[in-house]
Image (spheres, rainbow, N blue to C red):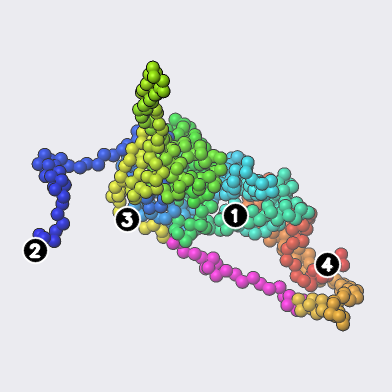
Amino acid sequence: MRGRLRLKKRFSARVVASFRDYFGFEEHPTWIRMPRAEETEHVMLLGDPGTGKSQTIHHFLLQIAARRPAEAVVIYDPACEFIKRHYNPKRGDTILNPLDKRSPYWSPAVEIRALTDKKLLAESFLPGKSDANQASTSGFFLKASRAIFGRMLEFKPTPAQMVAWLRSADAIDMIVDGTEHAHLIPKNAHGQRAGVLGVLSDLGETLRLLPERDDCVAEISLSEWAAQRRGWIFITSTMDTREALRPLQAVFINVLMKRLMSVSAEWGQAHPCWVIVDEVHSLHRLPALYETQTEGRKYGLKLVQGTQGKTQYEEYYDRLAKAMLAAPKLKLFFRCGESETARWISDTIGEYEVEKPKIGTTASVEDKGRDAINYSTVTEHRQAVSKEEIMSLPDLHGYWKYGDVVVPFRLPLAPVRIGARGYVAREMKPSEINLPIPKQEPGREAHEATSQQNAGRDTKQDASGTARPGRKKKSAPAPKRGKRDTSQHEHLITENGRELAGTLGVNIGEDSYTDGNDQRTSPEADIAMTPETGRAALESSEVDPELEASQVQY
């Protein structure tokens, strides 16, 4: 009974197995390799989720880690999958995640080394779409916001200072005062001003995520790292924080790509660097991605990008999508359930020619005629891999296309194990958890009740039920201001001026603001607090209601 329940093999399988055992034949996997000198031609992974793209990246990382001399890696890890299995602090690895406790301090101002760098950072924070496909209004708002954000970076502020500036329209006015950017947000053009300030307000939510210097153990400059290329950089997030961190992650990758192509070509080829971006479409548009694909090989960049289909590329890169998808020399195609993308993969793999014999017969109807038979060949073009075969591939199976060579392959699971934590939450400050309750102005409820009573008194209801405006009453004259009220009002103006100047206190001395009509300025700040700008800023600030009523007599 013990042997009857065991499944027996086929007779042919038993013969083949006994033949292999007798002659010592064993199955050994054959690895398909790409020449190391051509790795800078880049790699493209395309397929549905769960088909084998992440396993391919695991195999790449295992081989890169074993190379000597060591090669640097920048990897985008949106699900903390690769950091758990490949993070090594002894190698000098760095985690870029502002919500992770192990992440170092980073500020956009650290990357400013020349005036042209502000344009790079402004484009990274505000990528938008290509200029050719932008409407005139949205394109203007985007360009104006980039120019004003670049002006802010000239003062090299901290992220907290930039958030404070973006909260105050008066602070932004003072930053652009005296520059050509002041014409972008004039106060008399309400729609234009609101559109530009609305685009800038989105940056506040992004910059608010960056930690302060005292909350981090170390700090990093992406420009310095790109110039040295030591260790690996993991740009991580979790499922619930991915959408919030996406703008910052796009900034990290875009700045690194630009800086990695800023070194000399000879040094870059001697110190290659891998840039691995899985699910590249989730980062939306990366301005530096096209340049990295077309020119990155000159500087030793080896780009590996993965996506689910060409429709995501076309959504964010428009007409450049075709050239970007065709640029990588090595393409790995996995199962793709979308028919349009599967047809594109089939066309990319190519066709093959088949010659078929063709026989033609000619029969004569005359008595003395001749019958003829003609032999010829016809060449037919057929798809090497059909669309249906692409859509029905099993997991971990695909097609390797390198140049004009197409090879089907089966990918084994990568021998990796978890060796590090994927995410260590950073402790939030009490001020970030318990948000302050906005203070209500004194006498505001009484003022609103009085306004409602006056509104009801001015509107009279007639017999037909229609309302007609009543007679306007003369407003009572404001009480005369005494010397004490005048001194309090002047003191309030001075305090508001000091508070607004403190908001812009970057590269400005403590004694740069005076109580009189002297200008608050310094040679490095390039921002002056003149009486005109002080009054303009004070007009929109909060003033005590009693002092505001007494100001009518001026």
131 displayed left or right of 367: right
The part of the chain drawn in magenta is: 425-447
Q: Secondary structure at mark 2?
A: loop
- How far apart are the two marked residues, 4 and 2, measured between alpha carbons? 107 Å
51 displayed left or right of 457: left
Give the residue type at disc 3.
Ile
Point out the frontmost of discs 2 and 3.
2
Q: Position of residue 506 (x, y in %)?
A: 63, 52
- How far apart are the two marked residues, 2 and 3, measured between alpha carbons? 44 Å
Image height check: is 168 above or below 459? above
Q: Position of residue 281 (x, y in %)?
A: 49, 48
The residue indicated by pointer 2 is 1
Give the residue type at disc 4.
Gln
Label placed on residue 203: 1
- How far apart are the two marked residues, 3 and 1, measured between alpha carbons? 36 Å
Point out the frontmost of discs 3 and 4.
3
Depth check: 187 or 109 in front? 187
